[in-house]
Image (cartoon, rainbow, N blue to C red):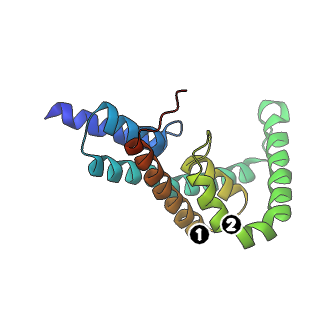
């Protein structure tokens, strides 16, 4: 029983981690731990989706904190320079990209999250959505849908025997 618990916990942890997410949790749970595929799918998707909203909230709180403290002279004014550079950068990105985000934002985030490429997934899509100023509810829904699609793709690849090895 404890072995099963630790295997399920491992699947959940892999789903939450930014380097593995659902793309690592599903193969581990099904191919390595030999767990029930439906259980692994649900646990992987749930774990990966779990990080989206808290991460969006945390990023907002960090930005607010930095903006409030940007006038403090930490590290010889380095913090002030970093924060002001961040503000200029994000405002420029948001201004330039806003028309495209308004037009393709939800679909673009879903496709970005779904794409089976390195550094795509819920974590980076959440960061991109935040930087681009996508509304939280829209970001959460589109990224969560992308996670489900990515999970389905990985599940299909597992059952078709697709391998990343040559």
Vertical order, 68 against 30 (above or below) = below
**Residue marked by disc 2:** 105
The CA span between labels 2 and 1 is 9 Å
Report if the CB atoms under discs 2 and 1 are less than 8 Å apart.
yes
| Label 1 crowd (10 A; few <14 / some 14-19 / many >=20) | some
Q: Position of residue 124 (x, y in %)?
A: 62, 47
Residue at x-position 42% and y-position 49%:
156
Q: Looking at the image, which is closer to me, 103 or 131? A: 103
Rendered image: mark on residue 138: 1
> Regarding mark 2 in the picture, which secondary structure is present there?
helix
Q: Position of residue 42 (x, y in %)?
A: 33, 53
Q: Quadrant of residue 116?
A: top right
> Regarding mark 1 in the picture, which secondary structure is present there?
helix
Q: Is residue 150 left or right of residue 128?
A: left
Residue at x-position 53% and y-position 40%:
18
Q: Looking at the image, which is closer to me, 99 or 78? A: 99
Vertical order, 133 against 30 (above or below) = below
Q: Position of residue 135 (x, y in %)?
A: 63, 68
């Amino acid at each position: 029983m404890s072995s099963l618990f630790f295997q399920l916990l491992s699947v959940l942890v892999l789903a939450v981690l930014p380097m593995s997410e659902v793309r690592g949790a599903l193969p581990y749970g099904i191919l390595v731990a030999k767990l029930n595929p439906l259980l692994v799918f649900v646990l992987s998707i749930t774990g990966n989706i779990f990080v989206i909203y808290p991460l969006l909230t945390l990023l907002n709180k960090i930005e607010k904190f930095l903006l409030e403290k940007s006038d403090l002279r930490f590290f010889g004014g380095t913090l002030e320079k970093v924060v002001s550079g961040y503000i200029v950068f994000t405002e420029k990105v948001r201004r330039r990209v806003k028309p495209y985000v308004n037009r393709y934002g939800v679909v673009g985030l879903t496709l970005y999250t779904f794409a089976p490429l390195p550094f795509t997934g819920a974590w980076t899509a959440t960061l991109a959505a935040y930087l681009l100023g996508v509304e939280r509810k829209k970001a959460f829904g589109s990224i969560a849908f992308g996670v489900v699609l990515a999970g389905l793709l990985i599940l299909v690849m597992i059952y078709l025997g697709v391998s990343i090895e040559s």
